[in-house]
Amino acid sequence: MSGNLAEDCDYLLTMFNPNDERYNLTTHFGQALKNNRGEPINPHLRTIHIAESRHCFFPQHFSTTMLGNLKKFN
């Protein structure tokens, strides 16, 4: 073990919630995040990113709908 996460893993995945108010985003992956009243259009939108990999091209980015309480991803 090197102590460097990117060197020790086969795949390094990250998940991002673009609706988190800390980031103050209006669009993500070309999609509007809020309607004209400032309400989230898709509150369950998440993006998954392959940041490092020994076995495939990286970086790669995927948009998904996540219902964590139901363990459901689309």
Image (cartoon, rainbow, N blue to C red):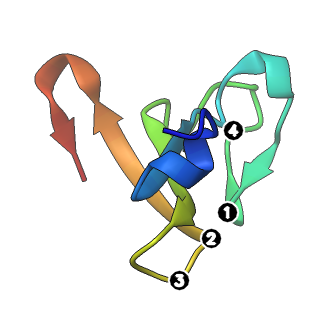
Residue 33 placement, left or right of 24: left
- Residue at left 25%, top 53%? 74
Distance from Cα at disc 4 to Cα at disc 2: 30 Å
Q: Nearer the viewer, mark 4 or mark 2?
A: 2
Q: Earlier in the sequence, mark 4 or mark 1?
A: 1
Question: Which amino acid, mark 3?
Answer: Phe
Q: Nearer the viewer, mark 1 or mark 2?
A: 2
Where residue 57 is drawn, which disc sits there? Answer: 3
> So how many labels did they put on this image?
4
**Residue 55, horizontal then vertical, whole percent:** 39, 77
Crowding at dot 3, Cα within 10 Å, few <14 / some 14-19 / many 20+, comes out as few
At numbered mark 1, what does the secondary structure look like: helix, strand or loop? loop
Q: Which mark, by number, is residue 35?
A: 4
Q: Is residue 62 left or right of residue 25?
A: left
Residue type at tag 2: Pro
- Residue type at numbered disc 4: Asn
- The mark that comes first in sequence, 3 or 4, is 4
Q: Where is residue 41 drawn, in percent x and y?
A: 56, 39
Residue 69's image quarter?
Answer: top left
The answer to which of 6 and 66 lies nearer the viewer is: 6
Whether the residues at callouts 4 and 1 have beta carbons within 8 Å, the answer is no
Q: Residue at x 60, y 30 (%)?
A: 40
Name the element at disc 4.
Answer: loop
Where disc 3 sits, the SS reads: loop
Q: Are marks 1 and 2 in contact (CB under 8 Å)?
A: no
Residue indicated by mark 2 = 59
Disc number at residue 8?
none
